[in-house]
Image (cartoon, grey):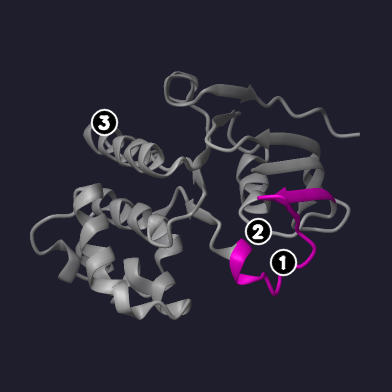
């Protein structure tokens, strides 16, 4: 499903935060990437999600070697769903309603006919009830905004879900609800999961196997 081979990546040329890292996620498998803050986990997750071009190495997604990050083909772009740690930073316009936030990927891919039905279905799955879908991003708490972020990540029915510290800022009950929603989606679809974070207990309970990433010292 996902193969990262000898990935080196960063944001300043000559100063990588990921060096020669490899991992694989099989079809239907849940893999945890465990490591301390600042070790480069999030950068690697963005490479895996085709959101950041690596400086070196190879990304193979669903059998296709990725060669173009700027103009990603639709088939690869919709293969991956991503939930990031900070929901407000990734949500965009604070005046956007949660319903519109969730629906954005459907609108971008031209699949507008199914928007209302799909958004309502996912809102129920992640626990967004009542009038929450009609509220703006600035009008809801981080927990409800992250529920919407998960729904948005699932709206195109991805075959791989990447959760980068999805529950880091959430309380225990919201964490439990979101993980349950992810697992329900995976049971229904057979999707793979790459879960990234520093919490050993959470990742080992959630995932089939966990990679303990201790990056090598700088040369």
Q: Position of residue 154 (x, y in %)?
A: 40, 55
Q: Taking 55 as reference, is 156 left or right?
A: left
Q: Please check the rendered image and state whether residue 66 is part of the magenta-colored stretch, yes or no.
A: yes
> What is the C-alpha distance between the residues marked 1 and 2?
6 Å
- Most foreground residue, 172 or 83: 83
Q: Quadrant of the N terminus?
A: top right
Start and end of the magenta stretch? 57-76
Q: Give the mark, 1 or 2, whose residue is nearer the N terminus.
A: 2
Q: Mark 3 and mark 1 in contact? Answer it, CB < 8 Å.
A: no
> In front: mark 3 or mark 2?
2
Q: Mark 1 and mark 2 in contact? Answer it, CB < 8 Å.
A: yes
Q: Residue at x 40, y 65 (%)?
A: 91
Residue 22 falls in image quadrant: top right
Disc 3, SS:
helix
Q: Residue 135, relative to residue 88: is it above or below?
A: below
Within-10-Å neighbours for mark 2: few <14, some 14–19, many 20+? many
């Amino acid at each position: 499903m996902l193969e990262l081979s000898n990935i080196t990546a960063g944001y300043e040329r000559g100063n990588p935060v990921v060096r020669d890292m490899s991992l694989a996620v099989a079809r239907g498998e849940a893999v945890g990437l465990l490591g301390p803050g600042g070790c480069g986990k999030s950068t690697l997750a963005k490479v895996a999600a085709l959101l950041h071009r690596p400086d070196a190495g190879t990304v193979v997604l669903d059998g296709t070697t990725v060669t173009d990050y700027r103009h990603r083909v639709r088939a690869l772009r919709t293969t991956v769903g991503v939930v990031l740690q900070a929901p407000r930073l990734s949500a965009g316009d604070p005046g956007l309603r949660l319903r519109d936030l969730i629906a954005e990927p459907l609108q971008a891919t031209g699949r507008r006919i199914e928007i209302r039905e799909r958004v309502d279905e996912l809102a129920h799955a992640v626990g967004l009830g009542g009038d929450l879908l009609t509220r703006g991003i600035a009008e809801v708490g981080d927990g409800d905004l992250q529920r919407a972020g998960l729904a948005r990540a699932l709206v195109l029915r991805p075959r791989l879900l990447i959760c980068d510290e999805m529950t880091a800022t959430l309380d225990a009950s919201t964490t439990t609800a979101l993980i349950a929603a992810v697992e329900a989606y995976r049971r229904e679809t057979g999707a793979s999961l790459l879960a990234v974070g520093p919490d050993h207990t959470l990742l080992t309970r959630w995932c089939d196997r966990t990679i303990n990433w201790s990056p090598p010292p700088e040369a």
